[in-house]
């Protein structure tokens, strides 16, 4: 399939004119190349682990907790 044939097929399927299809730059992808990404995204994932966020921001003891021998003696 030539580029012109691809542009016409995409134009017919989307209803856009050929100029717009050419401007957007459609191309055929090789099905054997599974790692193809024309615009790699180097940004970190845009999601929040609410459990991790909650742990760091609100996990504060109400009372001071004893440490050391006092705690181990079971008093």
Image (spheres, rainbow, N blue to C red):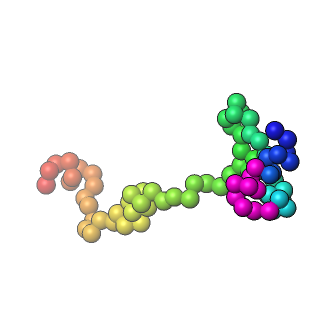
Q: Is residue 66 left or right of residue 43?
A: left
Rendered-image quadrant of the C terminus: bottom left
Q: At 20% across and 48% down in the image, what residue appears?
A: 72
Q: Is 4 in the magenta?
A: no
Q: At 39% across and 63% down in the image, what residue appears?
A: 54
Q: Is residue 60 left or right of residue 40?
A: left
Q: Is 11 in the magenta?
A: yes
**Residue 18 sits in quarter:** bottom right
**Residue 41 in sight here:** yes
Q: Is residue 2 left or right of residue 11?
A: right
28 or 12: nearer the viewer: 12
Q: Which residues are magenta?
A: 9-17
Residue 46 placed where, x, y %?
56, 59
For the stretch drawn in magenta, the main secondary structure is helix
Residue 65 placed where, x, y %?
26, 61
Rendered-image quadrant of the N terminus: top right
Q: At 77% across and 42% down in the image, what residue appears?
A: 28
Q: At 37% across and 67% down in the image, what residue appears?
A: 58
18 or 70: nearer the viewer: 18
Query: Which residue ends up furthest to the left in the rendered image?
Result: 75
4 or 72: nearer the viewer: 4
**Residue 56 in sight here:** no
């Amino acid at each position: 399939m030539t580029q012109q044939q691809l542009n016409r097929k995409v134009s017919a399927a989307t209803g856009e004119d050929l100029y717009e299809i050419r401007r957007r730059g459609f191309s055929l992808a090789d099905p054997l190349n599974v790692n193809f990404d024309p615009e790699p995204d180097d940004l970190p994932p845009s999601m929040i682990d609410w459990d991790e966020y909650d742990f760091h921001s609100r996990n504060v003891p109400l009372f001071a907790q004893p440490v050391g021998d006092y705690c181990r003696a079971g008093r």
